[in-house]
Image (cartoon, grey):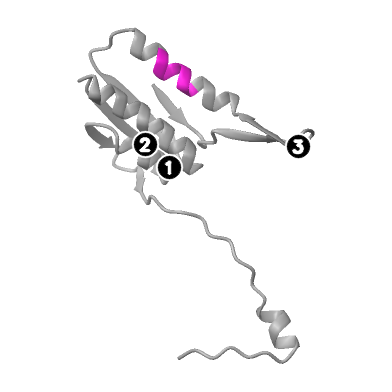
């Protein structure tokens, strides 16, 4: 199996405002289904992804765990980048193998905030730190 590129389980349909499943993500889930029906001796998941949505990453992790529960060995091979959500997915493997030059790790999150410091300074507000 191959996990390349961003992990986005849904896409926004701007015309109707409806969330739909990402076709690339659905194709990846189809790979898992096809592999499970083939009675594999083992699963090798090749990864080169910087991650994506938490929901999509956990869905892929659950697919990995399904193979492990069926006593099918799962090996994650980190080829380039295996970070954030793709690293979370790799954690479902029995073994993780990383290329020497691969970037591996960092299950984290993105936080957005409003920086109002210029507005506050312009209007006489001051921040004090204790």
User: Would you say the magenta stretch is mainly helix, strand or loop?
Assistant: helix
Alpha-carbon distance for marks 3 and 2?
29 Å
Whether tag 2 and tag 1 are in contact, CB under 8 A, the answer is yes
Dot 2 corresponds to which residue? Answer: 89
Dot 3 corresponds to which residue? Answer: 14
Query: Which residue: 69% across, 84% down?
Result: 120
Name the side, left or right, on which 74 lies relative to 119: left
Q: Which one is in front in this view, the residue at disc 3 or the one at disc 2?
A: 3
| Horizontal and vertical percent position of residue 17 | 74, 37
Label tally: 3
Dot 1 corresponds to which residue? Answer: 85
Task: Out of 37 and 46, give the one closest to the viewer.
Answer: 37
Q: Which residues are magenta?
A: 28-33
Mark with earlier residue (3, 2):
3
Tell me the element at label 1: helix
Alpha-carbon distance for marks 2 and 1?
6 Å
Magenta-drawn stretch contains 30: yes
């Amino acid at each position: 199996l191959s996990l390349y590129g961003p992990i986005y389980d849904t896409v926004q349909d701007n015309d109707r405002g409806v969330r739909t499943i990402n076709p690339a993500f659905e194709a990846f889930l189809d790979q898992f289904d096809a592999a499970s029906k083939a009675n594999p001796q083992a699963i090798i998941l090749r990864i080169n992804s910087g991650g994506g949505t938490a929901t999509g990453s956990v869905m892929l992790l659950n697919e990995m765990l399904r193979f492990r529960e069926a006593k099918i060995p799962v090996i994650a091979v980190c080829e380039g980048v295996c970070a954030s959500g793709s690293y979370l997915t790799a954690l479902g493997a029995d073994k993780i193998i990383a290329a020497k030059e691969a970037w591996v790790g960092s299950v984290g999150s993105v936080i957005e905030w409003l920086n109002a410091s210029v507005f506050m300074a312009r209007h006489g507000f001051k921040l004090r730190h204790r």
